[in-house]
Amino acid sequence: MEQRRLLIAVVLSLVILVSYNELVLKHYQKPRPTPAPGAQEDRSTPAPAASTQPDAPKPASKLAAPSEGQDAVVVETDLVRATFTTTGARLKELRLKHFQRFVHSEGEKLNLVQEGEVLPLTLRLGPEESDAGLTYKADRTELTLTGGNRGEITFTAQAPNGTQLEKRLTFAGDSYLFLLDTKVSGASAPQAIGLLMTPIPHEHTASTTPESALALDGHKLLHESVTALPKSPMTLTNSTWTGFGVQYFLAAVVPLPSPAPASLTTIDGLPIAQVDNPIAQGEAKFAVFMGPKDHEILVRAGLGLDRALDFGWFWFVAVPLLQGLKLLHALTGNWGIAIILLTTLVKVATIPLTQTTFKNMREMQRIQPQIQKLRERFKDDQVALQKETMELYRRHHVNPLSGCLPMVLQLPIFVGLYNALQYAIELRHAPFGFWINDLSAPDRLMVGGVGVPVLTILMGCSMFLQQWLTPQQGDPVQQRMMMIMPVIFTFMFINFPAGLVLYWLVNNILTIGQQYWMMRRAA
């Protein structure tokens, strides 16, 4: 009975982990930092650049300016094509050359800039001032870089109050990270500059997870759904980087050379990230990352950006498994086959643990009639029942907890692999075969105009068969509860990426084969 209860607890824990990850963490923010004393409660706009505390709401027009019809400055690298408008020297468009917008859109590269009058790289110069409406002059109209070559574009402008502004952008041909060095001079120059970032267009990325506002505040990663920002803006005092992310992409601002105050809020419903960097010797420097949430790319970029790829509690398992998945893909050329092989290797590695669990469950099943007799005999004496039950376990060399311990040890592996597949950008638009042409999207086989989740249904059936083959013990109520689990998982997985469902299906099939082999061997 104790083993059965622990087994149910382990399975329920797995359900809770997956459900919490899907339904809570991706929709709601972790506890946000407490605002500094004296900060106002109404924060519908970013903090002014000259202060670390937000002021009352300011008109959105101070940060907005149309970009259509203005001169364009284009930067081409091996990885991106970035277009800047001379009005505000802001980023109008940034397309990733190695990523399509849709699975079958060879001619349309993914754009990480959301259309609108508030654009990334707008400078906040004060509570009611920005450079959004200023006309800048660029020292060149285009810049092309390849490999490790680096190049610069400098924009200069003069504000109506006489403040001189300069934006110097430095790019590398092989990096998604670029530098922004801002210079201000004049009697009305601010003490700090706020650099703005806007959200990634969620509808363009075909992400299966909600868009999030992200920030690394000190050593703590904070994230909140952008839909919650109007009611729950975030004020950060020690931001390493701040920005927005979707399942596979990140747009973030990094203050240089050290952490600085920042805020995540909304202006007229538009989410805004603002990093406020103090001006030192007339300069304020930033780094900007706009690209894929690829583990190797983020680690190479440095600046703590790799924390944006959150693999959860078992990151130390997920990262090596992701590296193994890439290695298997290099050998097979198909991400679906790589998932199958990786799942198989994990299953083989855990065979001793699985055999221990199965053996103990068989022994527990064998002594169930004797346990039932003891319950009837000592139904009015719980102390004697516990004593006789433990003696029965001792005589048959059975530990009611040892069978579930291997399952507990396997849990980090299962969850780690689950998270690795959930955020592996390599699966985006990666075909497997048959009707599955995108392992990052839910599987749907069109039958009569209706999308049928065939892979998910097969996964549910395999899980039901797996439960049916598992040695039954305990009372009938608990057994029926275990048989409901496949139904719960099937509904949970309907909108999961096909790569994740494939992993669970293959794992179930291998477990069924292993259980059948052990049953034949025991017989």
Image (tube, grey):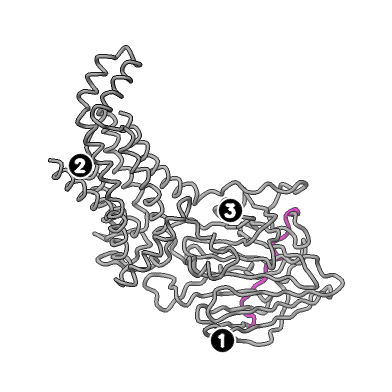
Q: Nearer the viewer, mark 2 or mark 1?
A: 2
Q: Nearer the viewer, residue 424 or 213?
A: 424
Q: Nearer the viewer, residue 161 or 322?
A: 322
Mark on residue 144? 1
The mark that comes first in sequence, 2 or 1, is: 1
The mark that comes first in sequence, 3 or 2, is: 3
Location of residue 373 by image quarter: top left
Distance Cα–Cα, label 3 vs label 1: 36 Å
User: Which residues lie in the magenta part?
Assistant: 54-71
Distance Cα–Cα, label 2 vs label 1: 62 Å
The amino acid beneath tag 1 is Thr
The amino acid beneath tag 3 is Leu
Distance Cα–Cα, label 3 vs label 2: 43 Å
- State the residue position of label 3: 222
- State the residue position of label 2: 469
In which quadrant of the rendered image does the N terminus lie? top left
Pointers 3 and 1 in contact (C-beta within 8 Å) = no
